[in-house]
Image (cartoon, grey):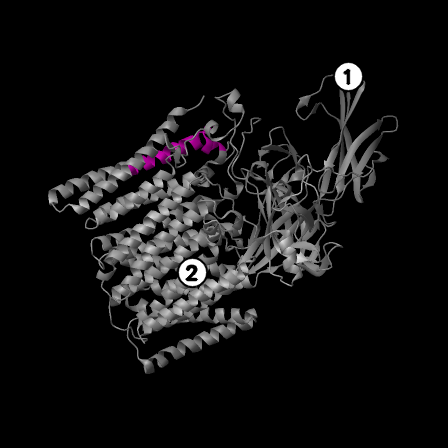
Amino acid sequence: MIHYFVGDLGHLFVIVSFVTSLVAAFAYWKARTITDVGVKQAWINNARIAFYAHTFAVIGVFVALFYIIYNHYFEYHYAYSHSSRHLPAHYMVSCFWEGQEGSFLLWIFWQALIGVVIIHTQKKWEAPVMVVFALVQAFLASMILGIVIPFADLKIGSSPFILLRDALNDPIFKIQPNFIPADGSGLNPLLQNYWMVIHPPTLFLGFALTIVPFAFCIAGLWERKYSEWIKPALPWTLLGGAILGLGILMGGYWAYETLNFGGYWNWDPVENAVYVPWLILIASIHTMIVYKNNQTALKTSIILVISVFILILYSTFLTRSGILGDASVHSFTDLGLSGQLLIYLLFFTIAAVVLAIVRWKEIPSSEKEVSIYSREFWIFLGATTLCLMGFQVIIPTSIPVYNSIVGLFGGTSNLAPPADQVAFYSKFQLWFGVAIALLSGTAQFFWYKRIDKSKLKKELLPTVLISLVVFALIISIAGISIPSYLVLTLAGVYIIVSNLKVLWSVFKIKPSLSGGALAHIGIGIALIGIMFSAGYSSVVSLNNTGMLISTELSTEFNRDNLLLFINEPRSMAGYDIEFLGERFEAKNKSGYVKKNDVLLTPDPYQVVAKQDIFYKDKMLYAKKDTFEIYPENTYYEIELRKGDEVEAVLYPRVQINEAMGGFIASPDINRGAVRDLYTHVSAPMNREAEVEWSDLEEVKVKPGEQFFVNDYVAVLEDVKRIDEIQGVTLRADDVAVQANVSVKGERDTYYADPIFLIKDKTQVGRISSEINDLGVKITLLNIHPETNEFTLGLNARQKDWVIIKALEKPFINLLWLGTGILIIGFSIAMVRRFKTA
Amino acid sequence: MKKSHILAIVVIAAAIGIIIATAGDASTYVNFSQAYEMASTGNNTSIHVVGQLKKDPSGHVIGVKNSSDNLSFSFLLVDDKGEEQKVFYNEPMPPDFTRSENVVVIGGFQENNFVANKILLKCPSKYQEQSVNAGI
């Protein structure tokens, strides 16, 4: 039965949220233009009611969509394509933002909440600021509106409440219009990760927060309060900087843990699209602080604040319109919203720019020249560098846009993004990082007093000396030799030392002022962490003997990947690497289970233990226990040893998921204080492909007798009669015997239990038993009761293998530590500004 | 001259520098014959070629060959102009490789063979189902 009601209700809420946001915008607009106090208040009251109704409707949409996902209403396209019955409840939250509609919804939701806070805290600014808010909400709500204008044949927005039969053109709906699939196609397993539950909400909260400074800035220009808007906007900008930064960091951490490109940042257009607005946001914070202290840089602040919001819209356009196409490894689903997104982007860009131009002449600007010995001069330089840093990233990221624009005018442009994105961006961003570190390290000397030339030397000298000593220590221990990395390390140390000095003196006077110094220390630590973990990341599995990959090519290639046969250690880069077999993950207990130790059942999610199962010396399950696993995931146990010491046991994952394109590999990381060891599977053995078994070899043995199979020692332990086979009870006149064969592998003893069956006295059946790890198949061919002997058939195949890549990443923890400190610094500064705002 | 003017000039110069550097480092989308021409004139910059895997009339991908140790593989790619070219890739074959509809190879020619440094797979059906799996 199709549950129409909840979907219709949800869709109604979407329409209500769209209409109420327009009503709120209009009412606030009226309130702002009318001078009569009574009428003004009446309009404000109306506007508030409309905005509250809007917020309520947005929450209603949220609840309705979640209800559909949670109750597995697969007649809805959203539930069908993003969820499935086996999905754990906590990942159902992630289903929300796998789809574009859900992530728009998330953005709308946060913005509505922030709007409510603004209504309650900023009475003086309410009307003009909320006009901007409500308009943005209207545009966002239109993205999920999902209505068709009848005569123009124009579709506005894509509704998350669309039925499966309306979304897909599947013939089954012609035969059976009320067909409901029994299960959904599931959530992308890459998103079945803790970080993917919290990363999108954080990132979209960051997105949503950028509207606050923008709205205040527009309100300031509109109301001709050119400088007053900075004070209420600044703490929100700081909050936005912290949250957006945290969101980006979580995304990087998720990529490091889940994707297999070997790092946390790949300079992919999707990443760049949020990195650039964040940089400009940070620059705007700096110029706003300059203005508050010195009454300069007001115009720059206005330009930057507007730019941040437009860049957020631009990044939304880039990632959701499908324009990136071949330029990104990410697959974007084009919902046909490109035009709508473009209108959204252009509307706010043009409106903001026009308003700024109209008011430009009236904006006060200070004519006084800034001294080189003032803090403001250095901060301003820093903000400029941040802008250039962002500019350098956005220019190449927009290459597909240039191609489209040229195409629009009838030309053809075949420009492609740089072939090696990481190398290309790194070579520029590294020097920007150095400049930022040097500028902000120096700016700190001017923190609380003006210093002249002679005094500066005295102040600068100890910091520079300490920095050089620490720098010398680091390079002598870590052995850095590449010039650009040396400079980056020195700059990183310098910003840390100079800010520590400031932190020390500020902390004594007033701890609440220490946010800035702390944030800059975080930047320095993060820079050094990036330098080590990215610059000195080494491939442990590197095979640098050089090999021809084909006789057709004379060039020799190094190999980053390693082919490992089971239980055959290989020595690489100081490590012994050994593949120990394939594992399942137990669902209800934490631990990995050998595939050899379990029997599969008709239900793929349940297995039976063949023997007592241990993980790390703890018994997980006793023999014959039935327990739950995740059948789609296979873990490959890889041991890394140095000498006789086991350095790490890693379990990289491979997920076979037809719906998602077949094969998804996720790394496993062994985290250490000074380095991370990182391994992922590059290619697993294809079990579905035809297995080539050797010719059958026959042996005749008595119980207790030894024999060889595939060069392993085996013993026929015993043979006994059984009454049931895989849960099927045999009839009285059927005879079944099961042999129990033990095979001694390199590390473990394995058991095979082939069955010999006589049905209806005449029909003979044989069920052979495989030991996957050893590549052995044993069949009980015949029984000789007269001599108490048994004929066993033996087949062998190539042993199990896996191809892996292993990397060592030194000091990556410095990056996480540094960004953590940065966020704390932001928070301290934000709390102070909120208190004084 | 005021300091702010000097700063403005420096910023503009840096911005122009960035644009020029981007234009210099940007790659291009070409077809195989253009790529071959570039390589034979000594231009060894990496380029992008978009194409499709070669298929037999019944739609099966043909020409994909694994190396004996499974660590690298080669395949036949047909570019937009219909030209067919053998491409080598020094990485194990991704298991979903043969399922991808469009393949972007980034690399260049070495002795009549195209060696890819990176391949991007485009599986349009990856995140958006086109039909319902009625069996389940």
Name the residue located 30 percent from the left edge and 52 percent from the top edge.
Answer: A352
Name the residue located 45 percent from the left edge and 70 percent from the top edge.
Answer: A491
Q: Helix or strand or loop: what does disc 1 sit on? A: loop
Quadrant of image for the C terminus of chain B? top right
Do the dots labelled 2 and 1 sit on one chain?
Answer: yes
Name the residue at the front extreme.
A410
Quadrant of image for the N terminus of chain B? bottom left
Q: Residues in magenta?
A: A54-80
Looking at the magenta stretch, what is its main secondary structure?
A: helix
Q: Real-space Cα distance between discs 2 and 1?
A: 81 Å
Give me the chain letter of mark 1.
A
Q: Amino acid at mark 2?
A: Phe
Residue A641 is situated, as x and y percent measured from the top left of the image, at 65, 56
Residue topped by disc 2: A391
Residue A657 is situated, as x and y percent measured from the top left of the image, at 58, 38
Q: Is A634 positioned to the left or the right of A812 in the image? A: right
Give me the chain letter of mark 2.
A
Q: Are marks 2 and 1 in contact (CB under 8 Å)?
A: no
Residue topped by disc 1: A760
Asked whether A721 or A635 is in front, the reply is A635
Q: Earlier in the sequence, mark 2 or mark 1?
A: 2
Q: Does the magenta-highlighted stretch encompass residue A76?
A: yes
Of tags 2 and 1, the one toward the viewer is: 2
Q: Does the magenta-highlighted stretch encompass residue A728?
A: no
